C-alpha cells in the first residue's frame, strides 16, 4: 500500500547520523532543482503550435522569458509570429497572463514557480 504513495521507500530512509542527514538533504536538493509549469495557448498561438497546452520543465529560478525560450524549443513554429526572434519575449500583438490573475506588461523577468500557468493570448482571441 505504501509503494503507491512512496514508490522508492524514501519515507523509511534512516537519518540516524549527520551523514544520513546530509545524504537526505542532497537528495532533496537534487529533486527540487526543477519546476514544472504549463503554457496555455489561445488563438493564433494555438493554431501555430497545434496544441492548446504545453507542459514545460525549467530550472529552478526560471523566469517567464526562460519559459518563452523553452516554448520556442518545443514549438518552433511560434518563433517570429508569437514569440519574438530573441525567443525571450513575445511578438507584438500578444499578451501573457500569469495564473489567470495578472497580465504581465512586458516584464519577462518575473520568476516562475512549480504549478504556474502562463496563458498566451493574441488580439484575435480577446487578449
Image: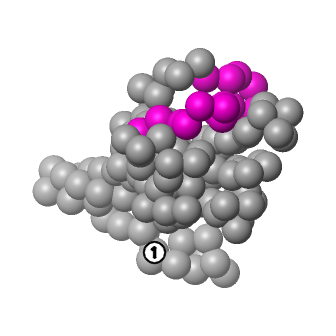
| Front residue of 20 and 32 | 32
109 w.r.t. 79: above or below: above
Task: Give the labeled residue for mark 1.
Answer: 9
Q: Position of residue 87 (x, y in %)?
A: 41, 45
Report x, y in % for residue 114: 54, 45
Q: Which residues are magenta?
A: 88-104
- In the depicted view, which residue is nearer to us: 66 or 75? 75
Q: Position of residue 63 (x, y in %)?
A: 43, 35
Task: State which quadrant residue 125 falls in.
Answer: top right
For the C terminus, the image quarter is: top right
Q: Residue at x 43, y 61 (%)?
A: 73
Q: Position of residue 47 (x, y in %)?
A: 74, 61
Residue at x 45%, y 77% (from the top left corner) = 8
Residue at left offset 85%, top offset 33%? 126
Whether residue 93 can be seen here: yes
Between 6 and 16, the one nearer to me in the picture: 6
Vertical side of 114 occupied by 1: above or below? below
* Quadrant of the rendering where the N terminus is positioned: bottom right
Q: Nearer the viewer, residue 125 or 68?
A: 125
Q: Is residue 100 magenta?
A: yes
Q: Name the side, left or right, on which 57 lies relative to 25.
A: right
Q: Secondary structure at mark 1?
A: loop
Can residue 67 be spotted in the picture? no
Q: Rate crowding at label 1 as few (under 14), some (14 to 19) or many (20 or more) other CA atoms within 10 Å.
A: few
Which image quarter: residue 52? bottom right
Is 49 above or below relative to 39?
A: below
Position of residue 44 in the picture relative to residue 57 (left or right): right
Query: Position of 27 compared to 36: left or right?
Result: left
In the rendered image, residue 87 lying in the magenta stretch gets the answer: no
Amino acid at each position: 500500500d505504501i509503494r503507491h504513495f512512496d514508490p522508492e521507500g524514501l519515507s523509511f530512509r534512516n537519518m540516524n547520523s549527520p551523514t544520513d542527514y546530509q545524504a537526505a538533504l542532497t537528495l532533496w536538493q537534487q529533486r527540487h532543482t526543477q519546476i514544472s509549469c504549463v503554457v496555455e495557448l489561445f488563438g493564433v498561438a494555438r493554431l501555430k503550435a497545434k496544441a492548446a497546452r504545453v507542459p514545460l520543465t525549467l530550472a529552478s529560478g526560471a523566469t517567464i522569458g526562460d519559459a518563452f525560450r523553452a516554448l520556442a524549443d518545443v514549438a518552433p513554429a511560434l518563433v517570429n509570429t508569437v514569440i519574438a526572434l530573441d525567443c525571450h519575449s513575445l511578438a507584438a500583438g500578444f499578451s501573457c497572463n500569469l495564473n489567470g490573475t495578472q497580465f504581465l506588461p512586458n516584464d519577462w523577468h518575473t520568476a516562475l514557480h512549480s504549478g504556474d500557468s502562463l496563458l498566451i493570448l493574441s488580439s484575435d482571441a480577446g487578449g
